[in-house]
């Protein structure tokens, strides 16, 4: 399943929320996961993290170009 999906990026939650809404509305098939490694690394180094958990967004390879167009329209790169 995941081999059919292409990662379009890792986003802060506020960006991911806008992007996921647009992708869903357009019928783009997607896969979402999270990356908390930045938060863990910051907490280990500084005691309190400055980076939030990121949302990793992947889209079906057949929907990739449409997803990139939507990202451009939203100003998300």
Image (cartoon, rainbow, N blue to C red):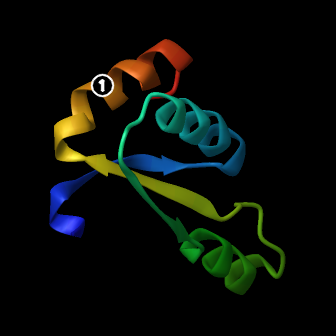
Image height of 47 relative to 5, above or below: below
Residue 43 point in image, percent of width and height: 74, 80
Residue in the picture at 59% in, 59% down: 54
Image height of 76 relative to 10, above or below: above
Q: Would residue 53 be found to the left or right of residue 59 on screen?
A: right
Residue in the picture at 64% in, 38% down: 15
In this view, which residue lies farthest toward the top?
A: 73
Q: Quadrant of the N terminus?
A: bottom left
The foreground one among 30 and 71 is 30
Residue 9 point in image, percent of width and height: 41, 47
Q: Quadrant of the C terminus?
A: top left
Residue in the picture at 53% in, 31% down: 25
In this view, which residue lies farthest toward the right?
A: 48
Q: Would residue 3 be found to the left or right of residue 2 on screen?
A: left
| Quarter residue 67 falls in | top left
The foreground one among 47 and 7 is 7
Q: Residues within 10 Å of mark 1 (few under 14, many from 20)?
A: some
Q: Would residue 36 be found to the left or right of residue 47 on screen?
A: left
Image height of 56 relative to 24, above or below: below
| Quarter residue 65 falls in | top left
Residue in the picture at 77% in, 77% down: 46
In this view, which residue lies farthest toward the bottom?
A: 44
Q: Which residue is mark 1?
A: 66
The foreground one among 8 and 37 is 8
Residue 24 point in image, percent of width and height: 51, 38
Describe the element under mark 1 as helix, strand or loop.
helix
């Amino acid at each position: 399943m995941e081999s059919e999906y292409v990662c379009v990026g890792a986003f802060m939650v506020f960006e991911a929320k806008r992007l996921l809404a647009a992708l869903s509305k357009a019928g783009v098939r997607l896969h979402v996961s999270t990356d908390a490694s930045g938060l863990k690394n910051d907490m280990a180094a500084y005691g309190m993290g400055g980076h939030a958990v990121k949302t990793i967004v992947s889209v079906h390879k057949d929907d990739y170009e449409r997803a990139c167009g939507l990202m451009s329209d939203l100003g998300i790169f």
